[in-house]
Amino acid sequence: MNLFITITIIVFIFFPNNAVSSHCNTQTPTKTFQKCMTLPSQQASIAWTFHPHNATLDLVFFGNFISPSGWVGWGINPASSEMTGTRALIAFPDPNSGQIVLLPYVIDPTVKLQRTPLLSRPLDIHLLSSSATLYGGKLATVHSGAAVQIFATLKLAPNRTRIHHVWNRGLYVQGYSPTIHPTNADDLSSTATIDVESGSTAGGQRNGVVVTLRTFHGIINAIAWGILLPTGAVTARYLRHIQSIGPTWFYVHMGIQLSGFVLGTVGFAVGIRLGDLSPGVQYGLHRKLGFAAFLLGALQTLALLFRPKTTNKFRKYWKSYHHFVGYACVVLGVINVFQGFEVMGQGRSYAKLGYCLCLATLIGACISLEVNSWVVFCRKAKEEKMRREGLIGGSDKGSGIHN
């Protein structure tokens, strides 16, 4: 029951954006558009009017700054739905006047690899006009969370109504060169393909599947590697010394660990699938930690098949191996849960706070049990010393907990 409550709480923490969807807006203070669409990341949206008689597209992008010295950009990729090759319009505060400026940039491969700074240059698309305004008018200032509107009028190729568009935002601008954007999940998936005549999206269902799988991956792994496996390790360390429960501790420990590993295997498989569905999106450290934790978990599970009897001379070596691999798996799993929060852009979220509270509760319980174990150990050592000295009888019982 407690596990069900925990899962329910985590689901509601992780799914706030899915439960309450934002609405797009077709109106600005200066223009009204025919269609609009909420974009799948960064709380961004677009609105547009397409004029089929002359293949002209009037468009506005709604975005938000994430720092006072940051930038917000929107652009079109003539070839594919990816960042490299995008013809972008990027808005940021002018370093001299502080007023919002909008400049054109071409995102070529050297920029993506950070070999050269991003410099403004004319675009090779039919851009008829462009401008940017802050929400609130001329008196508005750029700050974290400030809303910006990027307007553009483009002439599309005849009989071509589908466009690949890309949007993003960054923390800093060096002079007039925007620096690289953050690399969490939202920032690496800020692309889409839309048909401006019908309003339909290409790959929208795929993006929805990726978002759902990513959330499921985060929830199931936080429970498995971040809660169940550490709890199983705690039960083995402290419950096995209690004489009154007999071998029950072993079955509790094994049940928790196997449940955690099965759930963790499901989460691991979902992570592999997410990698296949997200070409070009790589989380090197998170991926390596995930493989390492899964390998250690698999070795622990296989070790049960080769568990020697208590009378076997190799039992002590098996126990040392079991302890080392088990604790290493728990530590790597917990570290990777925190790394996962960063990857998902939840580094300062209530989801991470909730997990930290769960982990802190478990650590607090460990400290209490460890202190109690040492108190019992010291008391038994003192009783044994007094027994050797003949101060107490050999029939006196301890506390019911043995070494």
Image (cartoon, helix red, strand yellow):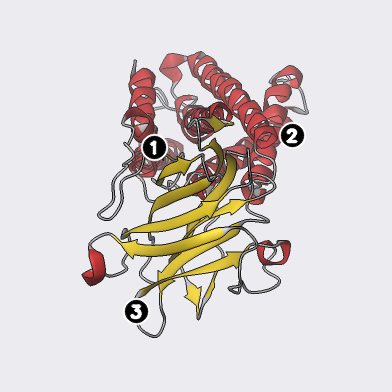
Q: Earlier in the sequence, mark 3 or mark 1?
A: 1
**Residue at (49% x, 64% y) in the render:** 90
Mark sitting on residue 317? 2
Mark sitting on residue 35? 1
213 lies left or right of 85: left
**Residue at (68% x, 73% y) in the render:** 116
Residue 213: name its quadrant: top right
Label 1, label 2: how many angstroms apart (C-alpha)?
Answer: 69 Å
**Residue at (70% x, 63% y) in the render:** 113
Counting from the top left corner in percent of width and height, residue 189 is at: 56, 44
Q: Residues within 10 Å of mark 2 (few under 14, many from 20)?
A: few
Q: Amino acid at mark 1?
A: Lys
Q: Amino acid at mark 2?
A: Tyr
The reply to whether discs 3 and 1 touch (Cβ–Cβ < 8 Å) is no
Q: Residues within 10 Å of mark 3 (few under 14, many from 20)?
A: few
Residue 390: name its quadrant: top left
* On screen, residue 402 above or below 52: above
**Residue indicated by mark 3:** 98
Of 253 and 178, nearer the camera is: 178
Residue at disc 1, secondary structure: strand
**Residue at (63% x, 74% y) in the render:** 117
194 lies left or right of 17: right
Q: Earlier in the sequence, mark 1 or mark 2?
A: 1
Label 3, label 2: how many angstroms apart (C-alpha)?
Answer: 68 Å
Q: Amino acid at mark 3?
A: Gly
